[in-house]
Amino acid sequence: MALFVVTAAASFYMFTTINRSFFPAEDIGSMMVSTQGSQDASFDAMKTLQLKAQSIIMANKAVAHSTAILRNNSNSGFLFVQLKPLGTRPAMGVVLAQLRKSLAEVPGLKSFVTPSTSIRFGGRATQSQYQLVLQSVDATVARDWAAKLQNAMTADTATFADVATDYQDKALQASVVVDRDAASRLGVTSAALRSTLEAGFGTYVPTQIQTTGSSYNVILEYDPAFQWTEMALADLKVPSTSGTLVPLSSFATVTRTAGPVSVNQTGQLTAVTLSFNLPAGVSLGTATARIDQMKAQLGMPQTVLTSYAGAAALFQQSSGNTGLLIFAAVLTIYVVLGVLYESFIHPITILSGLPSAALGSLIALEMFGFDLSIIALIGLLMLIGIVKKNAIMMIDVALVLRREEGMNAVDAIRIAAARRFRPIMMTTFCALLGVLPIALGTGASSELRQPLGVAVAGGLVVSQALTLFITPVIFVQIEALSAWVSRVVLRRRDAAI
């Protein structure tokens, strides 16, 4: 009985303290590198930096090939990197560390290296994998606190990597202030000014070139070789209603200012998204707990709303429902067993082996360096169904012996355990051999499935060693309790008569 109490307490403690994550990190042989230049970087400057980053990536012996993509009119880009087969290169974590170190040496370019996964989740497009969104009614407050939190996360290199923000407010821009009275006198309409600027600096597509199976946009723009400055823009000619070309300087003032690259909103509130990756060995649960600590240490006001997006948001939701999910599974099995045995107490005996199985699973996960992820949780739920069959096989025989041969509880469970020992061992070893290939991590994307195999294997080994001792004791104690309750009820009934 003491062994049951100890295993139950130990399994509860480990369940509440073990590191948690959403899905295990896997190595599918590819990664994405997000690049970001200075906010006033031109397309040509970004092209030069992007090609330099690509040459550094291709110099790594683990890389097979890469594809570089630049966004139009943006200071950011992407590189899709395909690695060589796993047997001919180091593990994904080693390659990530190598590329982060080498890409950090490119001046004027920030690089964020994220491994690709076979399971993807929605969210805003950001440089890193996990996302934290800050919002406030006052946009300035949200941006200020996002900057403070970003600095704190960047300084904590043991917990976070590749911390980035989507708010950039130092991009060069030209502000055109129109004198509407002067424009009216000269016959220049706002539509004419807007179409002139859009045709020269936008992505206006007047037509397409059609070929067999393909079409190509024809983009109208000013000569890229022309150096555009405020003075040059002021000489831009705008058609008037009379057909004459009027210089922009005749009715407008052009000034160079700094402004945001983009303004993001979520739910009609200004939103700043911080994205981050995790260093090797750090779980997502550890990172989210650390963010909560930083918010408290910095004194973030309640007017700043924080929420996770994408995979981090789904992790938060799943973490809150884990205990409820396990409780629902156990309750369902209890009800089914109660109907099967027509008893409220015998299902408790059968379920008494679950704490030892949970303890074995959690110890195995901790021992082999795995977090309690969704995949490991599936393994725990599988164990609930696998482990209870040991007790079922013993309890069935013990109840038959008590009912048909009139044995006491001690003798009945002793004989039942001896008779069913071989079938119990056979079914346990069959299940163990079935999950062994998964636990060993063989095959493509085995990192995703391995926690399931480790959880099931660890739970089977420990539960097999302990339930043969725990279940008979629980059976005897519950039978004694049931007999005592029956005697008390009968005495009260007789006294009432």
Image (tube, rainbow, N blue to C red):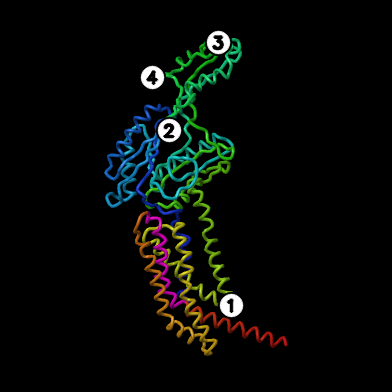
Q: What element carries label 3?
A: loop
Q: What element carries label 2?
A: strand
The residue indicated by pointer 2 is: 214
Q: Is mark 1 on a helix, strand or loop?
A: loop
Dot 2 amino acid type: Ser
Name which of mark 1 and mark 2 comes first in the sequence.
2
Distance in Å between CA atoms under marks 1 and 3: 96 Å
The residue indicated by pointer 4 is: 225
**Where does the image place residue 474, in percent across and percent down from the top left?**
50, 78
Q: In this view, does 104 lie to the left or right of 233?
A: left
Q: Which of marks 4 and 2 is in front?
A: 2
Observer-nearest residue: 471 or 380?
Answer: 380
Q: Nearer the viewer, mark 4 or mark 1?
A: 4
Residue in view at x 38 percent, y 46 percent: 115
- Vertical side of 223 occupied by 242: above or below: above
Q: In this view, does 12 lie to the left or right of 180?
A: left
Residue in view at x 45 percent, y 15 percent: 232
Q: Which of marks 3 and 4 is in front?
A: 3
Range shown magenta: 445-470
- Vertical side of 342 occupied by 68: above or below: above
Dot 4 amino acid type: Ala
The residue indicated by pointer 1 is: 343
Residues packed near mark 4 inside 10 Å, few (<14), some (14 to 19) or many (20 plus): few
